[in-house]
Amino acid sequence: MTRFIHDRFAKEYLEEMLSPIGTVNIGRDVTSEVREIDVYFTPGTPIPEYTENLGLLGKMACTTAIFEPFRNPIAVSDVWNCTSKLFDLRRELERQARRENTRYDDAKLPFLWILTPTASKSIVSGFGGMPDPSNWLEGIYFFPEHWQGAIVVIHQLPETPETLWLRILGKGKVQQRAVSQLSALATNDPLRITALELLYRLQSNLVTDIPQELESEERELIMAITPLFQQQIQAAQQQAREEGLERGLERGLERGLERGLERGLERGRQEQQRLILSDFLPGKFGELSPKMSVFLTPLSKLSATEFTRMLLAISMLTVDESGQQQAVKLLAEYVLKRY
C-alpha cells in the first residue's frame, strides 16, 4: 500500500521540479491499451540557471522525455512495460504524421528514463544497457541506440550536488542522506522549498493514511524530514524578525525607537506565522474552512515554540472529515491556552 504513496510522490516531485522549464503531463494515455506514461516532459523556454541547478535531472530534461520512476528495484517485466509504452507512442506519432501528411521524424520521439533504486546486473546487461562515462555519470545504462532509453540506477549515482534531486527519489539510506543534505542549502532556495513541500506531504500521507504498514526505512525517512520542517519554520520566523525589525525602525522614527522595534518585531513575527498557517491548513486539508479561518489571527500570536508544536501536531492528523474536526478542536485548544 505504501508503494502507491511513494509512486504518487515521485510523479508529483518530477512534475514540480520540471514544470518551470517545460510542460509536464502526468499519466498521459497511450493507445492500443489503457496504459499511462508516468511523467511526460516537453521542454519549454530555456532557463539555463534553473536547468543547471537541477544538475543531472536538468540534463535529462534538455529534450522531450518520459520518466518512469520505481520505488522498488525493477524487474524484467517492468522494463518491457516501459519500453512498450515508448513503442506505442512511436506508432501514435507515426499515425499523426500520416494524418497531417508530414514525414515522421524519430527525433520527435521522447527519450525514456527508467528510474530505479537498484537493478541487477542481469537485467541491465539483458537489455543491452551500457554506461557512457565520457558523457554521463556512473549509474546510468543506455539501451542500444534505436531503443531511445536508459536505466538510471539511483543508488549507483555519485553522492554529489549534481545528483541530489534524483537521489531524493531513492530508497532507504540513500534517500535519507539526500533529504538530510537539503539542510545545507539556503532556506530560500526554490528547489529546496519545492522538495520540502512535497516531502512534508509524503510524510503526512505516510503517517496519516497507513501508519500501521510503515516499514522501518519509512519511519527513518519521517525522522529525517522532521528536522528540516522545523528548520524551515525557524527560517520563516527569522525572516519575520528581520522584517519586523525593519518595520519597527520605520515606526520608531515616529513613536520612539525602542517601542517601535519591539512592536515591529512582534507584529512581523505574528504576520509571518499567520501566513504560514493560512498556507499550511489548505495544503493539509484541501481547503481552509470557515471554522479554521477564525483561528488564524489569534493563533498567529502564539510563541514560536507553541506554534511549531501546533503545526507538527496538525501534520499528524488524517486528511478526512474526522481529521478536520480534530484540527478545529486542536486549534481551539491552542487559542484557549493563550487566555
Image (cartoon, rainbow, N blue to C red):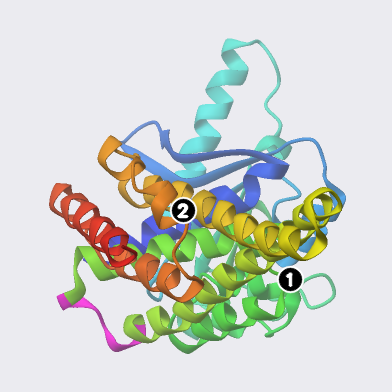
As measured in the structure, the alpha-carbon distance from the residue carrying label 2 to the one carrying label 1 is: 25 Å
The spot of residue 64 in percent (x, y) is 67, 43
Q: Identify the residue shown where x is 15% and y is 47%.
A: 321
State whether residue 198 is above or below residue 157: above
Q: Nearer the viewer, residue 244 or 82?
A: 244
Can residue 142 be seen by looking at this rendering? no
Vertical side of 103 occupied by 174: above or below: below
Using the rendered image of the protein, determine whether residue 51 is visible from the camera's viewpoint. yes
In the drawing, what numbered circle is on residue 11?
2
Ranked by sequence position, the earlier of labels 2 and 1 is 2
Q: Is residue 183 magenta?
A: no
Placement of 163 over or under 192, stated as above or below: below
Compare residues 211 and 28 and report the one nearer the observer: 211
Q: Relative to the observer, which residue lies in front, 74 or 302?
A: 302
What percent of the width, then of the height, locates residue 225?
A: 47, 77
Q: Which residues are magenta?
A: 212-217
Nearest to viewer (mark 2 / mark 1): 1
Q: How many marks?
A: 2
At 27% from the left edge and 70% from the top edge, which residue is drawn?
207
Q: Quadrant of residue 244?
A: bottom right
Q: Quadrant of the C terminus?
A: bottom left
Badge 2 density bin: few <14, some 14–19, many ≥20, Cα 10 Å: many
Towards the viewer: 98 or 66 = 66
Name the residue at 47% across, 48% down: 279
Name the residue type under label 1. Ala
For the stretch drawn in magenta, the main secondary structure is helix
Residue 186: numbered disc:
1
Instruction: Give the amino acid type for the residue marked by disc 2 in the picture.
Output: Lys
- Indicate whether residue 216 is drawn in magenta: yes
Give the left or right position of residue 63, taking residue 210 as reference. right
